[in-house]
Image: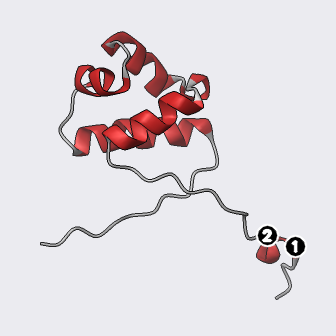
C-alpha cells in the first residue's frame, strides 16, 4: 500500500508533543533512538514529549528530520471565523 502523507493542524504545544510521541511510535522508534539522532538523552526526549513548549527550534528541526516530518508554517485562514453568517 503506498504511503499517503498526513497533515496535522497544531494549535497547542500539547498537541505537538502528542504528535511527536505518536509519530515516534508509528515509526517503531524508542525515545533513546530519537535521542541519539537529535543529540539528547532518552530522559530528555521523554521530558520534551510531555513538555513540548521547552523544545528549541534547533531540537525541533532535528526531531522532525529524525521522524521524517516536514515542518510547514503558514498564515491561518480566519475568514470563516470572522464571517460566521456565510
Q: How crowded is mark 2: few (under 14 residues within 10 Å), some or many (20 or more)?
A: few
Near-viewer residue (26 or 72): 72
In the displayed structure image, the side of residue 67 where residue 58 appears, left or right: right
Q: How crowded is mark 1: few (under 14 residues within 10 Å), some or many (20 or more)?
A: few
Q: How many marks?
A: 2
In the displayed structure image, the side of residue 40 where residue 80 appears, left or right: right
Q: Which residue lies furthest to the left in this view?
A: 1
Q: Position of residue 53 (x, y in %)?
A: 61, 28
Q: What element carries label 2?
A: loop
Q: Mark 2 points at which residue?
A: 78
Rendered image coloring scheme: secondary structure
Near-viewer residue (67 or 85): 67
Q: How far apart are marks 2 and 1 (CA)?
A: 6 Å
Location of the N terminus (image quadrant) = bottom left
Whether residues under marks 2 and 1 lie with C-beta atoms below 8 angstroms apart, the answer is yes
Q: Name the residue under label 1.
A: 82
In the displayed structure image, the side of residue 1 where residue 66 appears, left or right: right
Q: Is mark 1 on a helix, strand or loop?
A: helix
Above or below 76: residue 83: below
Near-viewer residue (69 or 84): 69
Q: Which residue is drawn at 87% across and 73% down?
A: 82
Q: Which residue lies furthest to the bottom in this view?
A: 86
Asked which quadrant contains residue 4, the reply is bottom left
Amino acid at each position: 500500500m503506498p504511503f499517503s502523507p498526513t497533515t496535522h493542524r497544531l494549535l497547542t504545544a500539547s498537541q505537538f508533543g502528542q504528535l511527536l510521541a505518536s509519530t515516534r511510535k508509528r515509526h517503531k522508534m524508542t525515545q533513546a533512538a530519537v535521542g541519539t539522532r537529535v543529540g539528547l538523552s532518552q530522559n530528555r526526549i521523554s521530558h520534551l514529549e510531555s513538555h513540548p513548549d521547552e523544545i528549541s527550534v534547533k531540537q525541533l528541526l532535528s526531531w522532525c528530520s529524525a521522524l521524517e516530518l516536514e515542518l510547514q508554517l503558514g498564515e491561518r485562514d480566519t475568514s470563516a471565523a470572522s464571517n460566521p453568517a456565510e
